[in-house]
Amino acid sequence: MKPAKKLMKEELGQFVDHLSKEYLVYGPVARRSDFSFQEIDSAEDLRFDYTTTTIPPKKFFHHRQTLLRYSGEDYSELESTLEKRFLLLGVHSCDLNAILRHDRLFTRQFHDPYYLKLRRNSAIVALICTHIGNSCFCASLGTGPTIREGFDLLLTDLGNEYLIEVGSSEGQRMIEELNLQKANSSDLEKKEERVKLALTQFVKSMKMDGLNQLALKYLDHEVWSLIGEKGGLAGCFACLSCGNCSLVCPTCYCFEVADIPELSLNQGVRIRELDSCQLLEYAEVALGGNFRRDRKARVRQWMTCKFGGAGGGFDSSCVGCGRCINACPSHIDITEVAKSLRGE
Amino acid sequence: MKLRCGFFKFTGCSGCQMEILRLEDELPPLLEMIEIAYWPMVTSKRWEENLDIAFVEGSVSTPREVKEIKEIRKRSRHLVAFGECAITGCIPSIRNFMTQSEAEETVYEHTDWIESIKPSEISEYVRTDISLPGCPPHRNTILEVIKAVALQRKPHLKHHSVCVECKLKDNNCLLTTEKRPCMGPVTNAGCGAICPSLNRECEGCYGPMSAANASSQSQILAEIGLSMDDVKRKFRKYAGTTDEYRKEAA
Ligand code: SF4
Ligand code: SF4
Ligand code: SF4
Ligand code: SF4
Ligand code: SF4
């Protein structure tokens, strides 16, 4: 590991300008009532005090993509239109862990060229969380707020400056030309204090161990009818099957593929976009058959997958980002479902 | 062979038909593909031959329309319920929550001149092959239906919530974060979440989605402060007489 460095807060602008020479830089900015990863023109827009973004960084890798253009029997893959590499600046630990899970998922049996192309074109500067949202529970899952792997650089807000740790040779290159001060052992101690302080801020937690088995064992557990039909688990309403939870979940990966022909009919494009097991059409097969016609079965599938009990295993399981809780109009809370399954 | 198409207007505002004219750039290639066999809005040509696709806009609200929709069904290979009025009764169906006499007397001086029945979706009278939701339907979905018929496959239309499109657009949620009465969680997608993308709540103009849970949605709207009368109005606006919304709209 290369020695850690320090960046004074007033130098953040220069740092971003420097990165912008090599990369398209995206980072958290404030919108009317949320935070979002957007292209950064000026460091002033950056909001390193953000709690969470509505949409996770998965939008850069796996959201909605044109896969290929076809013409008659021929097809050609579309060349990437990005001239530069892109850099995600200020990625939190939950989201970084989710990206690492998707890296595994998309290279398991088949290598997914579309995901990998974007992923290989990206770099990540991670950020230790200092502002914990009310729905966050990464600490209880071991997916935050500390970060150990997967970043090129790692920033920690120490008050007047950022501690910069290097995680890769690309990260080293990012700061090479900058004349940064070396961090000393007291800076590293300060980082540990920051993490400790963050740990005291968590409101929610979830005990993941064995949940995958429990979910599969208790297919008729009362909790499924509470969240799927009746409502009433910790004040929730019944699920709407709206799909918000999985669209915002950083580890949800399911997608749909469709051909969009031009009016000539023999040419067109093939696209893919995120799908969700919460939607009725997800499990529909020919002649209108459907394996999960009941709302209860769908919401159970979603939870089971987030507990690591579905096809994606732990590569699509929960990292504790809290987004699904924030995004659910019916206030369905995965941590409450877990408690109920455990009989707590 | 071009697809022989007819465009019919029942009780509606012509907005759905206008949406086809608004295709503009796509119109020349579209006209390579379809033949306009009948479309009073653009040509005085009379309807003679049987149709490959009949697009029917509007709800059925007169005895004459009842006869006409049956005739159209008989003479068309694909009958498209074109837009919300044809699918759910849409805005005209708001008047189904009052008596016929009250509706007539509110509007007309001489009610004996009026020959009208409660507006209903066209599937009340005939079988439809394709529903093209929206008030009005998005142009891409109109094109998709025509292309699908030409390719002899099922049209790729979305039946899930507007929320999915809203999230794919990277919007923040008006309902959960700003406590604004957005109907996205029960409304059929297809518009591309136009309204939330422009900081307006979804009003539900694409009708109920495939698995709409109106009961939860009404509890959520009440929770954020709508009166029960306003909740009712939300559900009545576009699809109050559908199976999905009937209870919440009543
Ligand atoms: S299940 Fe919920 S809390 Fe867990 S990673 Fe997904 S969105 Fe975040
Ligand atoms: S099956 Fe799993 S990854 Fe796929 S949409 Fe459902 S919860 Fe998400
Ligand atoms: S966000 Fe909530 S209501 Fe919507 S599908 Fe997910 S659990 Fe159900
Ligand atoms: S703003 Fe409306 S359409 Fe968008 S996610 Fe929220 S509830 Fe759904
Ligand atoms: S967002 Fe809702 S009201 Fe607006 S166009 Fe779409 S379906 Fe209609």
Image (cartoon, coloured by chain):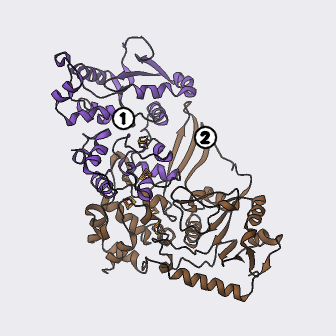
Chain colours: A brown, B purple
Which circle marks residue A70 in the picture? 2
Q: Where in the figure is residue A305, as x and y percent of width and height?
A: 42, 67
- Is residue B128 visible in the rendered structure shown here? no
Kindly identify which residue carries mark 1: B130
Q: Residue at x 43, y 31 (%)?
A: B149
Query: Against A201, is B87 above or below?
Result: above
Q: Where in the figure is residue A278, as x and y percent of width and height?
A: 39, 58
Q: Please tell me if label 1 and label 2 are on a single chain.
A: no
Query: Against A322, is B14 above or below?
Result: above
Mark 2 secondary-structure assignment: strand
Mark 1 secondary-structure assignment: strand
Judge by depth and name the residue closer to the eye, B229 or B95: B229
Whether disc 2's CB lies below 8 Å from ligand 2 is answered: no
Q: Crowding near pointer 1: few (<14 within 10 Å), some, many (20+)?
A: some
Q: Where in the figure is residue A17, as x and y percent of width and height?
A: 76, 61
Circle 1 or circle 2, nearest the eye: 1
Q: Quadrant of the N terminus of chain A?
A: bottom right
Q: Crowding near pointer 2: few (<14 within 10 Å), some, many (20+)?
A: some
Query: Against A337, is B169 above or below?
Result: above
Task: Specify the quadrant of the image occupied by residue A211.
Answer: bottom left
Q: Where in the figure is residue B72, as x and y percent of width and height?
A: 31, 22
- Is residue B71 visible in the rendered structure shown here? yes
Q: Quadrant of the C terminus of chain A?
A: bottom left
Judge by depth and name the residue closer to the eye, A150 or A286: A150
Distance from disc 1 to disc 2, alpha carbons, whole Å, reads 27 Å
The chain under label 1 reads B
Of the residues shown, which amino acid type is indicated by label 2? Tyr
Task: Specify the quadrant of the image occupied by residue B238.
Answer: top left
Of the residues shown, which amino acid type is indicated by label 1? Ile
Number of disc labels = 2
Q: Residue at x 45, y 66 (%)?
A: A311
Q: Which quadrant does ligand 2 occupy?
A: bottom left
